[in-house]
Image (cartoon, coloured by chain):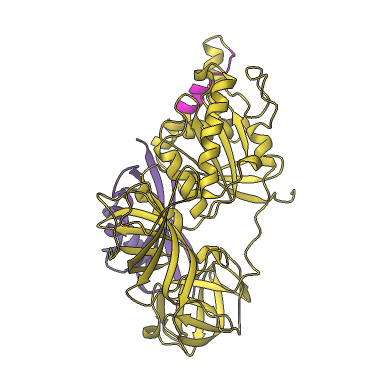
Amino acid sequence: MGNVAIIVKIMPESPEVDREALKAAVRAAVPVDDIQEEPIGFGLVALKAAVVVPDSAGAPDEVEAALQKIDGVASAEIVESTLV
Amino acid sequence: MAVEKPHMNLAVIGHIDHGKSTTVGRLLFETGAVAPHIIESFRKEAESKGKGSFEFAWVMDSLKEERERGITIDIAHKRFDTDKFYFTVVDCPGHRDFVKNMITGASQADAALLVVAAPDGVMEQTKEHVFLSRTLGINQLIIGINKMDAAKYDEKRYNEVKEQLSQLLKVVGYKPDAISFIPMSAFVGDNISKPSENTPWYKGPTVLDALNALTEPEKPTNLPMRLPIQDVYSISGIGTVPVGRVETGIMKKGMKVSFMPANKEGEIKSIEMHHEEIPQALPGDNVGFNVRGIGKGDIRRGDVCGAADVPPTVAEEFIAQVVVLHHPSALTVGYTPVFHCHTAQIACSFVELMKKLDPRTGQVKEENPTFLKTGDAAIVKIRPTQPMVIEKVKEIPQLGRFAVRDMGSTIAAGVCMDITPKQMR
């Protein structure tokens, strides 16, 4: 069984959400390897986080659920996954 | 700077331990995509030990060590170039719980390389991945019959596995005659970039030849505009701003749009991407757009924005072809799991099991079966418990696919064949 790198796109609840605080909360919630900003528009900036999880049952759901619980997160959705 | 080559997303699929990762490593190496510092440190090590010969295993180990130091978002996108294309590779996870993300995720594969180990032949995940490729709308397939070195480069074994695979491919509607079956060894390097002396009986293309022979996918700009909504914002001084990725068609400033199943109409006032205003957005673009005539509470995640003259289809019922990936017992009429389709998550009932298909021949094996179990493919009738947008996979493939989930696990995947539309006006 290998490991999977997943990229999660995290949308803030509003353009006013403090991005640095949000990044810290994301890092505290899941084992993040990398995190980058993706500007959308109208002041909204998505965060993209790379997380490595085992290629096994429930792994992607757990990451999405942990991120969705964070204050200031509107949605967290896996956009890509590849074995590493 | 030279003109950028056309881009292709390549999914590498197949059963666990059939050599997918080694194949990806080999492709990166043969196309010169392994980082120069890795090659350089290898060269030094080889020199210090007084041997110049290439050890592919060493490169694989180095790549693994590098990954273990941490994944960056860019490294997750493995890239290599052939003469004709540049590829980004997705090495598909084996577990079915990743299927939902492959169906609703961002980068749809344009082609798939199916890796099957010659000694084992067709295994469970081989079947699952072939069904899924078809469901995901991957029409271009290349087959690597791998580990030929472990099968003594035996032509007879190659033909046996090719025949097994051909049967399987016919079931889901691929044409085996139009597909390359390449005997290869990712580990040794046979038939990857040049014809191998170990398989003198094989006259077909190498893996790189087959990759170069793929057809560049067209962007679905001619289809009706569809943008499934990810989130909706109310931005002070601007108004309602839905956010999402354009799946098909072109979204233009000034365009009249319809949101379904909310059944609301509005007009696009402006579109922004990367914090810049753009006059139009194309398939694949992640955008925010300001829309006149719509309040934040009128629409929500899972709704679909479409052209007002060709509004998104809301299904009263739909007919689907599904493959049951995993069900603990038997799936019967009345079962109501959650369907994940674009950004929507809606509980839907199986109201009729119409036909069970024979996985060997693709023919109807049983009319009106009483139940379906793991591994079955079937035609079924589905009724959403709440209004839901779905499109026929033949008309708008991007919105015609779904994953079926229940109690936190992936049960099935499927495509929508026909729709009884709900009258919205």
Quarter of the figure with residue B310: bottom right
The reply to whether residue B92 is visible in this rendering is no
- Residue B153: percent from the left, percent from the top? 57, 18
Q: Is residue A37 left or right of residue B254?
A: left
- Residue B414: percent from the left, percent from the top? 44, 58
Quarter of the figure with residue B206: top right
- Height in image: B197 above or below B13? above
- Residue B130: percent from the left, percent from the top? 49, 45
Tell me which residue sits at (24%, 57%) in the image.
B407
Q: Nearer the viewer, residue B349 or B269?
A: B349
- Height in image: B363 above or below A46? above
Report the chain shown in purple.
Answer: A
Q: Is residue B175 left or right of residue B91?
A: right
Most extreme residue toward the top is B50
Most extreme residue toward the right is B2
Tell me which residue sits at (57%, 21%) in the image.
B156
Most extreme residue toward the front is B367
Q: Which residues are magenta?
A: B52-61
- Height in image: B361 above or below B320? above
> Dominant secondary structure of the magenta stretch?
helix
- Whether the magenta-drawn stretch holds residue B56 is answered as yes
The reply to whether residue B116 is visible in this rendering is yes
Q: How many marks?
A: 0
Please name the color used to draw chain B: yellow
Tell me which residue sits at (46%, 34%) in the image.
B122
- Residue B47: percent from the left, percent from the top? 56, 14
- Whether the magenta-drawn stretch holds residue B176 is answered as no
Q: Nearer the viewer, residue B58 or B134?
A: B134
